[in-house]
Amino acid sequence: MINELFKKEYQESLEISEDWLQSLKSNSWDNLNKNRWPTFRKDENWRYTNPELFFKDIDFNSKSNYLETDIEKFIMKDMINIVIKDGKIYNKDLDDALDISDIWNDKNRELLENDKSGDNFKELNSALFNSGVVIRVKKDEKPKKAIHLIHVTDGSIFIKNIILLEKFSNATILESIISKKDGVTELTNISTTILLEESSKLTHFKSELVKENHNSFSSMEIEQKKDSSYTNFYFTNGGKYTRNEIRVDLNEEGAETTLNGIYLLKDKYHNDNSTLINHFSPNTKSKQLYKGILDDSSHAIFDGKIIVHPDAQQVSSEQLNQNLVLNDKARIESKPQLEIGADDVKCSHGTTIGQLDSRQIFYFQSRGFSKERAVEILSKAFINEMLKDIKNDIIKDYFSVLVELSFYK
Amino acid sequence: MLEIKDLYVKVANSDTDIEILKGINLSIKRGEVHAIMGPNGSGKSTLSKVIAGDSEYEVTRGSMSFNVNFKNKDLLEMEPDIRAKEGIFLGFQYPIEIPGVNNIEFLKSAFDEICKYQHVERLSDEDFLILVKEKMKILGMDEKFIDREVNVDFSGGEKKRNEILQMAVLNPKLAMLDETDSGLDVDSLKMVGENIAKLKNRNNAIILVTHYQRLLDYVQPDYIHVLYKGEIIKTGTKELALEIEKRGFDWIINPQEEKKG
């Protein structure tokens, strides 16, 4: 039924593709029709998020109405800005350490052919993608500045990105999705594959500044080789229906990964963070910290799974999910899961769900702060703790502003 | 300044109707120092928290009014922050730790809130810092406490000094100090006591909640009230505190038995 919705989109997407890409897309479309969509509540990974709701009432018109002056506002100083608009690289700054190309460019054929198939969300993306970029960071290189990847979109869009870090390279990327269309429901479906070669290092920030009519489904697959390091920092202030899936495969020894997430939800927003970390090799490390504040009747899900595969000894893995619930109607489902197949590992996980401490609120009040102000300051303190470790000052300031804006009423 | 009449208080949202304060009458005029003494669990801390507006307690009967500039204001109608803005200050027995909030920013924001409410001109950040540093010096507080998180990793004595620092900066009309003397060593007690005495003037009033007479060596009280099982069972002058120091509370609580003995 979902597939029917996209038939026209699929045909259109084929028309604009080269032959080799057409065959890849039709392959994915066939898989999509062979596979079944996950079932709400029945499938373990879909107990609290209904896959069908991402597609409810969505508008397909994905042409952007942005003017050049609008786009200039999103360009950040002292960063390598890459703007993707209407499916194409619209504007990019240059750096010798980087090779940046549109996803559908012929030279990316091999990368796309090697891209793994997946569940129906991924297959749908692979059949329909009409926008995206491949960023290659060259061997031993480090761009002079952090990269700012901006997706400008109006209406629904399917984006596929591949980020490849060659051996001993190092980069910082900030990814923003910007959308301003009002009135209609839109869907952003982004699939990102990140390949980290030996001893490469990627720090990846992602902010979703979406509106009440925005559905977003994002899936990231990170493949890590020997001694590589990946850090993800995700921020969202909601959206109608959103899911952020991250799968990390620590394939070789010495690979390390850190996932940080902040979700600040209000109204009826729904945000689902599902992470899966596969420790396939010995001496691999992972660390996760997800913090959320839930107001009004918002709903958050944290579903974090860590699998330590047999023979992956000397693994260290930490996971923590902390939630502040400001309203009786808000809900959080937190599901930490640990599967350990090796015996010499160090793993910890935990969840906290709580309200603000009434003693602290009274202390503020007794010093002349209104209750609302006390709640705001305490909530910000709960989140700002996570920003302390951001090393890039521009991005740190940007995230501080995002937090600040989320509390602005 | 403060008029409390026939005040009854119980724990809020509790099933029991057991009252912690039973018919308190207290009148405090500006320029006065009142000490509230009594054994543990007599309701001393509750009284000061109720005056500050702690929602953990519920007033079931009686009235509390606060007189500022010849206007009587009903405290029971006021949120805790409004009471603070009107000039009521509670020095906590156990000051609360606020991780992630900077000590001086907290104090500056509190100061600004109160200035704004009272239509007093605010200070620039620089002038405020000068004011705070000056007060800290008098209190014997290290300047490192400026940039620390509010009360986080402070020792007991440091927390109490931080409370007095807040009082010194916020300059309240009525300051209630809840066992500010407990947990202090002799030198700290002297310093805190002397500073409270310095902060006292003709226009403000102080309520000292204490177990012991020792703080009263530094801050001379005009009245001593003995609170027992939620009632003020005796009111006297500073000599009463000396007598309590010598004889304990028993002779006041059980006058009959005391005579027999």
Image: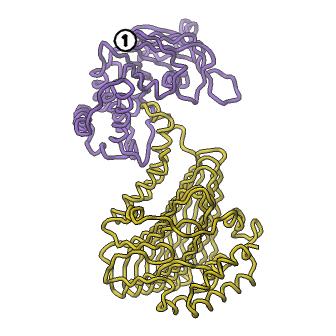
Residue A371 can be seen, yes or no: yes
- Which one is in front, B151 or A365? A365
Residue located beneath label 1 in the image = B30
Where residue B123 appears, as percent x and y from the top left, is: 27, 33
In the picture, which chain is yellow? A
Count the labels in the image.
1
In the picture, which chain is purple? B
Where residue A309 appears, as percent x and y from the top left, is: 61, 81
Figure quadrant of the N terminus of chain A:
bottom right
Q: Is residue A328 above or below residue B128?
A: below
Residue B214 can be seen, yes or no: no
Residue at (59, 66) in percent of width and height = A216
* Residue A2 falls left or right of residue B260: right
Residue at (30, 43) in percent of width and height = B146
Where residue A334 appears, as percent x and y from the top left, is: 63, 60
Q: Is residue B147 above or below residue B260?
A: below
Where residue B5 appears, as percent x and y from the top left, is: 54, 10
Display coloring: by chain
Q: Amino acid at mark 1?
A: Arg
Q: Tell me which corner region of the image, top left, top right, bottom left or bottom right, holds residue A63.
A: bottom right
Q: Secondary structure at mark 1?
A: loop
